[in-house]
Image: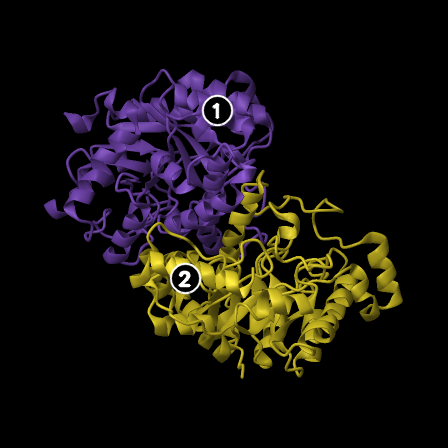
């Protein structure tokens, strides 16, 4: 979609609902979820030791599911991508920097895009040594291919998160490089993320002032719900928000926020509508049963309010947009971060995703100011 | 204490009779299983979802000297009917039938629990109703159990746990839903797990508290499963009652699910309406635990649901969800109180009108 097309659409929607449009001009955004990938796996060869390159080409990635090609729940679009995000030369979505500038960075006024590499990264692989090698390689690759040539991009430190100590070592190694904005974990870890085996990650990140981002997806080996494997992609997709709820509940009740008061956690791509209800539910039951969780010393909602940030995409679309504004109010205007999820199909357009009727000052916080403060940008 | 009384004729849609022990059920087993209980030393199937001594499992002032609660009709009469003037109550027995792996044993235990409920509870007080406990380990045997008990109109719904063998929308369960629909029995999906799998998508939580909080995620999955599989196309009269699920998670979940339906409906083309509309028509929720922090928030959530017909009064007795004498929060407006207490339960459970209850007299 070109800039002209975007503006045409905007003009149309303005004339439809002139009184409700809040933004006569476009301003820049910080996009807290952009997905880079390789053109082909060979892009990673320079960053892998021979032994691991051979392993990769022999066995491939081995996350905890049964499909050597494709996804256990086939997506609804090729590569789950916007159909206009393939480069003219056929490079797959998110792999061609020149085309990403033209297709995404320039038209959407992205002042900073935080990269969340999802695949291939080796995160959550059954072979932890391979996971260590791959995540290290992907971190080098992000610097060479994206952040050094394009200062608008910041990288995420991907880590072999099933090994807390190895993850902490990778964080130590990368923390001094300003191109990395955060540490990235996928929500579906093999145990709830608040358990002590993962604490070295939080300790290292908090020590270096790096937020820890929990991005949906990953293969924990467990079904997306405690009642078993669903049948459809729409169930799996909808279930990712539930996995975010489990992750936040675990962090709070295991006392991770209490233990690491400098820790900042960002939840990505699960939407945000579920967060107020989870906070109420946690508070309500903690009031009665808190004796079981001595590590969680204050009402859970307080930790969430102080140490958790959340991205907007894929933004909820209630029948009445005022309900979304109420939800944002419940969460806190300083805690919401805009994200597009480029180049994926459920991309949120910065021009149109946020609800009508949003106060302009709050809109600016969500679009850029909260992220600038959290990631110390600029 | 008249201020503690509920609207006359209030139906309590989630009350838990507690099986005192396997010995109480033995008389309701056939000779083979009676012998097996004895010979094999089978100790029973009390569920880990509600360990009897855990704080949530029974409010302190409802416990007997041995710490246990709700093991017979007498305390229910005294603590619910006499104290608050409830007109009736629906019994959801949470004995761990669903945890059993041997389907024959599961079916035998389900029969025993249901017959125990009929003989020792329903026969003992005309204000009581019950849910048919289903051995969903075998849909075939679950259908048999519905057919066996359905003639007794005091059974007003069927009972499943929110985490059982598989998501409940799947085809394997359709014969069960067909039987429930045929007999005018809503399906209660109740908090609790057979613990076939970890409670969360991230594995097993550490504490009971975390497990309980995480149950809301499984409710989300069951709503998604039932709607996505087109269960309500196939069974248009079927009603589902989410029991002890909490309430506040539902609107935001439906925004997400309905949005995903708009983007992904090519995968489930038989779902022809936004999920939020289907859920309004077919799903109900019991009141306790009231998980909104205050009245204004609660009202906003009900407003977001877009229906005041979805909530059914419950105490969740003997579970410890509230203290004092306000099973229905005092900030609920009078009109809502009546709807939740009487009108909505009567509309949800057709069988409530078919047998006179003590509350009607």
Relative image position of residue B179 (x, y in whole percent): 44, 20
Chain letter behind tag 1: B
Residue at image location 46% in from the left, 20% down from the top: B145
**Does the image show residue A21?**
yes
Which residue in the structure is indicated by mark 1? B176
Q: Are marks 2 and 1 in contact (CB under 8 Å)?
A: no
Residue closest to the eye, A233 or A62? A233
Tell me, what hue is chain A?
yellow
Residue A299 visible from this viewpoint: no
Q: Which residue is mark 2?
A: A11
Q: Which quarter of the image is occupied by the N terminus of chain A?
A: bottom right
**Label 2: how many residues lie within 10 Å, few (<14), some (14-19) or many (20+)?**
few
**Total number of numbered discs in the rendering:** 2
Q: Compared to A259, does B300 lie above or below?
A: above
Q: CA distance from mark 2 to mark 1?
A: 53 Å
The residue sitting at 65% across, 49% down in the picture is: A78
User: SS of the residue at dot 2?
Assistant: helix
Relative placement, left or right, of A65 versus A231 is: right
- Up the image or down, B4 lies above or below A144; here it is above
- Dot 1 alpha-carbon crowd within 10 angstroms: few under 14, some 14 to 19, many 20 or more: many
Name, please, the residue furthest toward the left. Answer: B2
Determine the chain carrying the residue at label 2.
A
Which quadrant holds residue B286? top left
- On screen, residue B89 versus residue A63, left or right, reads left
Colour scheme in the image? Answer: by chain
Marks 2 and 1 belong to one chain = no
Of the residues tagged 2 and 1, which is closer to the observer? 2
Question: Residue placed at 41% from the left, 53% from the top?
Answer: A317
- Residue A299 x %, y %: 38, 66
Query: Which chain is rendered purple in the image?
Result: B
Q: Quadrant of the C terminus of chain A?
A: bottom right
């Amino acid at each position: 979609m070109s800039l002209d097309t975007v503006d045409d659409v905007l003009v149309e929607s303005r004339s439809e609902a002139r009184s409700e449009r809040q933004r006569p001009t476009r301003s820049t955004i910080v996009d807290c979820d952009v997905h880079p990938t390789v053109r082909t796996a060979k892009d990673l060869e320079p960053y892998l030791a021979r032994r691991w390159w051979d392993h990769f080409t022999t066995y491939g990635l081995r996350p905890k599911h049964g499909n050597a090609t494709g996804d256990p729940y086939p997506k609804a679009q090729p590569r789950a991508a916007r159909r206009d995000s393939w480069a003219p030369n056929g490079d797959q979505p998110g792999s061609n920097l020149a085309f990403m500038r033209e297709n995404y960075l320039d038209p959407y006024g992205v002042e900073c895009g935080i990269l969340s590499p999802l695949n291939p990264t080796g995160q959550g692989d059954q072979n932890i040594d391979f996971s260590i090698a791959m995540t290290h390689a992907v971190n080098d690759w992000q610097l060479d291919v994206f952040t050094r040539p394009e200062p608008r991009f910041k990288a995420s430190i991907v880590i072999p998160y099933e090994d807390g100590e190895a993850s902490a070592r990778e964080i130590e190694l990368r923390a001094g490089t300003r191109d990395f904005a955060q540490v990235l974990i996928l929500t579906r870890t093999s145990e709830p993320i608040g358990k002590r085996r993962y604490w070295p990650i939080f300790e290292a990140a908090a020590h270096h002032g790096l937020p820890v981002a929990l991005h949906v997806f990953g293969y924990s080996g467990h079904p997306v719900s405690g009642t078993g494997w669903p049948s459809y992609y729409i169930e799996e997709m909808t279930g990712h928000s539930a996995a975010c709820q489990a992750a936040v509940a675990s962090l709070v009740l295991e006392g991770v926020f209490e233990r690491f008061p400098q820790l900042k956690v960002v939840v990505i791509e699960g939407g945000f509508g579920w967060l107020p209800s989870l906070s109420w539910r946690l508070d309500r039951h903690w009031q009665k049963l808190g004796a079981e969780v001595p590590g969680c010393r204050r009402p859970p909602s307080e930790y969430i309010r102080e140490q958790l940030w959340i991205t907007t995409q894929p933004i909820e679309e209630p029948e009445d947009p005022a309900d979304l504004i109420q939800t944002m109010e419940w969460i806190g205007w300083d805690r919401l971060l805009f994200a597009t999820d480029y180049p994926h199909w459920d991309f949120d357009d910065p021009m149109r995703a946020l609800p009508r009727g949003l106060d302009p000052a709050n809109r600016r916080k969500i679009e850029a100011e909260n992220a600038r403060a959290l990631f110390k940008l600029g | 204490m008249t201020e503690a009384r509920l609207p006359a004729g209030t139906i309590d849609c989630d009350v838990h009779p507690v099986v005192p022990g396997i010995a109480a059920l033995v008389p309701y087993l056939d000779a083979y299983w009676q012998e097996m209980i004895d010979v094999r030393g089978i100790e029973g199937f009390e569920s880990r979802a509600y360990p009897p001594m855990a704080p949530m499992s029974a409010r302190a002032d409802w416990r007997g000297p041995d710490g246990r609660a709700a093991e017979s009709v007498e305390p229910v009469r005294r603590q619910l009917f006499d104290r608050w003037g409830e007109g009736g109550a629906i019994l959801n027995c949470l004995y761990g039938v669903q945890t059993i792996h041997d389907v024959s044993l599961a079916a035998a235990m389900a029969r025993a629990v249901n017959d125990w409920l009929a003989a020792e509870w329903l026969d003992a007080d005309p204000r009581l109703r019950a849910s048919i406990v289903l051995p969903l380990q075998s849909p075939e045997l679950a259908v048999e159990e519905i057919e066996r008990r359905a003639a007794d109109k005091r059974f007003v719904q069927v009972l499943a746990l929110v985490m059982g063998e598989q998501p409940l929308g799947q085809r394997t369960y359709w014969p069960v839903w067909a039987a429930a629909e045929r007999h005018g029995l809503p399906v209660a999906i109740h908090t609790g797990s057979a613990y076939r799998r970890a409670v969360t998508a991230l594995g097993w939580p550490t504490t009971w508290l975390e497990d309980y909080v995480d149950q809301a995620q499984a409710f989300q999955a069951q709503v998604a499963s039932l709607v996505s599989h087109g269960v309500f196309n196939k069974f248009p009269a079927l009603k589902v009652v989410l029991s002890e699920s909490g309430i506040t998670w539902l609107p935001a979940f439906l925004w997400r699910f309905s949005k995903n339906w708009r983007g992904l409906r090519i995968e489930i083309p038989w779902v022809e309406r936004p999920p939020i509309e289907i859920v309004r028509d077919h799903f109900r929720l019991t009141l306790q635990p009231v998980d909104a922090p205050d009245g204004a928030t609660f009202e906003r959530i009900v407003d977001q649901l877009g229906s005041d017909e979805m909530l059914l009064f419950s105490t969740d007795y003997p579970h410890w969800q509230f203290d004092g004498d306000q099973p229905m929060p005092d900030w609920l407006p009078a009109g809502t109180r009546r709807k939740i207490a009487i009108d909505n339960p009567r509309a949800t459970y057709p069988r409530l009108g078919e047998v006179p209850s003590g509350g009607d007299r």
